[in-house]
Amino acid sequence: MAAPSMGGVSLPRGNGQTVRLPRGASLTDLAERINAEPAALVTALFHLGEMITATQSVNDETLQLLGAEIGWVIQVVSPEDEDRELLETFDLTFGDEEGDEDDWSSRPPVVTVMGHVDHGKTKLLDALRHTNVVSREAGGITQHIGAYQIVTELEHNERPITFIDTPGHESFTAMRARGAKVTDIVVLVVAADDGVMPQTVEALNHAQAAEVPIVVAVNKIDKEGANPAKIRQQLTEYGLVAEEYGGDTMFVDVSAINRQGLDDLLTAILLTADASLDLRANTEQDPQGVVIEGKLDKGRGPVATVLVQRGTLRQGDSIVAGDAYGRVRSLLDEHGNKLKEALPARPVQVVGLTSVPRAGDTFLVVEEDRVARQIADRRQARIRNAQNASMRKRISLEDLDAALKETRQLNLIIKGDNSGTVEALEEALMKIEVDDDISLRVIHRGVGGITKSDIDLALADDVIVLGFNVRAEGQATELANREGVDVRYYTVIYQAIDEIEAALKGMLKPEYEEVQLGTAEVREVFRVPKIGNVAGSLVRSGTIVRNSKARLVRDGAVVADNLTVESLRRFKDDATEVREGYECGIGLGSFNDIKIDDVIQTFEMREIPRT
Ligand code: GDP
């Protein structure tokens, strides 16, 4: 088949064969696969109305559109598939349980508390934390590490339960969405004095979609006006029928404040788990699980709270968690106690990673440090590509001219104290929309203080470095000061959003609007030697201001625009302004076509403040 000519550059034409490309691939990547010149693909895409350079990442639709044009089916491989393939190259899989029956044992349920804001999720999690029947070794104060395990008693057996303890913070919504596989049981909190609310329904939908059984905690029963029966009735509409009404959902009335009904709630959780789930895990396989929270600790470096899902995590294990890796230096529980090992469903803090993984990342233990590092490196590269692709603004051909001259971009580097806030901040900032001509791009993000290498990176135009709960370290401050890099510190997300929004607005071209200052009616026309005609006028409204812009209106039609009030007099004296009701003489420079009954309007162009 003859090569089609597109814009004068020939391209090898496909016959409908499939090419697989990772999300965020560039035209150079595609060119390599189909044995074409990258420049030819750039041109082809240009003719389809998109201007993208050879090395930029291209979004899915554009890749497919281009593929269709040149006879290839482009299959964009999702990050999940890609990751599965990456692990396969190391002979690893995530999620598959393996091993002999003998290696399996029952494991505690993992519970997530959900519900409408202010219905008492946080209070309930705090209250449940205190129900632990097993007293802990002296290990100091209980810390919030993102999850905790308590032990309760059921029919004289000690039964642990794991709670995911992430406050209803924006940064954890993402983790919760991804976290469906972490959770065995959802405790749906509904305030008895408030009833079913939008987020109650949302939580319920999430749980039902993930086929996770629900236990309903009807909270705040201590409050006046609490009506637990009404909650039961409301929820039947959503398919949750209480046991006492013949359904199979357990409802428990509680008061998180008075710590009332908590044992019943724990019992309901265990009974629901025993009735509908077979919670067992292989304790002997290579450990795997999910990252619940990541942060940078001043003394200990990167610390990740992980939930072990299978296998037994031990000190000394080589671990890869998302794009972080390392050797487990120590394992700590929520009381700060050192653990030798962590069994399935155990949340535990891992110290020893080289960087901070993100909430929702999976972790695996591998044979060798080298493998952990290689997997982490490959993931890092992939994350970078994917982020570049999703953040790049597509430039259409129509905008091309303008784009080349006009597109302005504000680049940001975001550093923060933990991965959740960095993600939340980035997400919030990317939502700011100011103007099509201006785009925001996060060129680097990370957990930890602002380092010299961050500042080095920022030494280009328009880079603002944001430190969220972190400061610049060592030489970074000095370098930033010397080079004039804009470094800003925040402790409140909204403040950061406001300031960045203001910075973006500052990049906009100013827009002006006409503001009427005054009108004057011409009563008489004087000829003044050397000056020309002067309009003897009466100011009808507003104020006539010298040097302001003016136009002349006759019988309702504009006779002349773009004039200037060049002279303004009251009687014999020069005036800077003359107010409504007063007479004055107005000179419009060299413009002399002034007649009695003309109206002179004056105005100024005022910059429109951005809202
Ligand atoms: P969240 O937004 O769901 O995490 O709700 P919080 O746990 O922050 O609770 C919201 C408000 O309800 C707080 O003022 C709590 O003190 C209050 N609250 C929580 N549980 C109870 C309860 O059982 N009884 C009463 N009276 N107030 C409660």
Image (cartoon, rainbow, N blue to C red):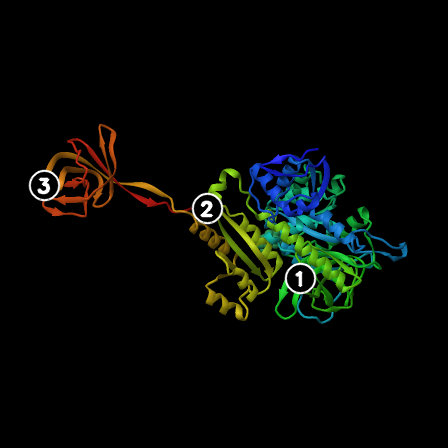
Q: Where residue 178 appears, x then y in whole percent?
A: 68, 49
Tell me the element at label 2: helix
The image shows a total of numbered marks equal to 3
Q: Is residue 592 above or below residue 440?
A: above
**Pointer 3: what residue?**
529
Distance between mark 1 and mark 2 Cα atoms: 49 Å
Tell me the element at label 3: loop
Tell me the element at label 1: loop
Question: Would residue 395 be seen by someone viewing this image from the given angle?
Answer: yes
Question: Of marks 2 and 3, which one's residue comes earlier in the chain?
Answer: 2
Tell me which amino acid carries mark 3: Pro
Q: Where residue 224 appears, x then y in whole percent?
A: 59, 48
The nearer-to-camera label among 2 and 3 is 2
**Pointer 2: what residue?**
405
The nearer-to-camera label among 1 and 3 is 3
**Pointer 1: what residue?**
145
